[in-house]
Image (tube, coloured by chain):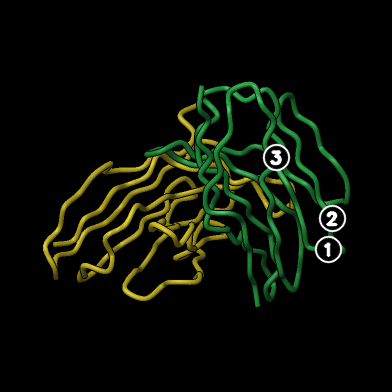
Chain colours: A green, B yellow
């Protein structure tokens, strides 16, 4: 079956670094996405990993280990506007198509 | 480009009423999706379409129907609304089947069924 786990809530201080972990179990892994979702808004794309290793994009980085079924999102130099939910999603081949399976999201609160 | 738009933004229905949610995208994307988001449940796929004239069931299709008569539009119908369908509904589109093609989401429709 398919399963994605990530922590429900995290807190951090402005200017700090935070790492949000995601573990997954899928049968037909075809890539992992991170989305940011501010309260009351739509999810927006942050990053994509399909090969093992680190992808860096400004203050955000995402890491993937396919053998461990593990990813993390690293947020550096935290700002108040980073307070949001972060959704881990795995693209999984099922039958003859692929579907994006979402975790329940990690709500990050950044304090001054 | 407006991206992905959804109509309406908010709606309150009584049990048994019907309604249609409209999703439109102006990016010429092939794939379109309907999700619902409930507290503690994450985004769950209702129905999806891999091209004009095609639709398929997702994880939670019961109580919903969809149509994709035009490439840019994807309609979600509730024939007889139930309180369990109170949720936030998101539409998304994706350019094609390449694995790195991300999904772009609409702003959501907040539906309450009394």
Q: Pointer 3: what residue?
A: A47
Is the C-beta separation of discs 2 and 1 under 8 Å? Answer: yes
The front one of A112 and A85 is A112
Q: Pointer 2: what residue?
A: A65
Residue A69 vs A74, above or below: the answer is below
User: Looking at the picture, how far across and down is residue B76, in whole percent?
Assistant: 35, 59
User: Looking at the picture, how far across and down is residue B23, in whole percent?
Assistant: 39, 47
Q: How far apart are the two marked residues, 2 and 1, measured between alpha carbons?
A: 5 Å
Q: Tell me which residue sits at (84%, 55%) in the image.
A: A65
Which element is circle 2 on?
strand
Chain on which label 1 sits: A
Q: Tell me which residue sits at (74%, 53%) in the image.
A: B99
Horizontal side of B30 relative to B15 (left or right) equals: right
Q: Tell me which residue sits at (69%, 46%) in the image.
A: B101
Few, some or many residues within 10 Å of mark 3 (<14, 14–19, 20+): many
Q: Quadrant of the C terminus of chain B?
A: bottom left
- Marks 2/3 same chain: yes
């Amino acid at each position: 079956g398919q399963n994605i786990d990530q922590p429900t809530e995290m807190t951090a201080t402005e200017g700090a670094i935070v790492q949000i972990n995601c573990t997954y179990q899928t049968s037909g892994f075809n890539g992992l996405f991170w989305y940011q979702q501010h309260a009351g808004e739509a999810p927006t794309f942050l990053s994509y990993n399909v090969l093992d290793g680190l992808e860096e994009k400004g203050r955000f980085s995402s890491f993937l280990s396919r053998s461990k079924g593990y990813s993390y999102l690293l947020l550096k130099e935290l700002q108040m506007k980073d307070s949001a939910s972060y959704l881990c999603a795995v693209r999984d081949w099922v039958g003859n198509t692929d579907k994006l399976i979402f975790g329940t999201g990690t709500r990050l609160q950044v304090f001054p | 480009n407006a991206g992905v738009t959804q109509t309406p933004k908010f709606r309150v229905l009584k049990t048994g009423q019907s309604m249609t949610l409209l999703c439109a995208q102006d990016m010429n994307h092939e794939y379109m999706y309907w999700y619902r988001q409930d507290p503690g449940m994450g985004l769950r796929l209702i129905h999806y379409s891999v091209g004009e004239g095609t639709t398929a069931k997702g994880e939670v299709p019961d109580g919903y129907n969809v149509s994709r008569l035009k490439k840019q539009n994807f309609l979600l119908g509730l024939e007889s609304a139930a309180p369990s369908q109170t949720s936030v509904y998101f539409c998304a589109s994706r350019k094609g089947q390449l694995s790195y093609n991300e999904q772009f989401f609409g702003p959501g429709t907040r539906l309450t069924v009394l």
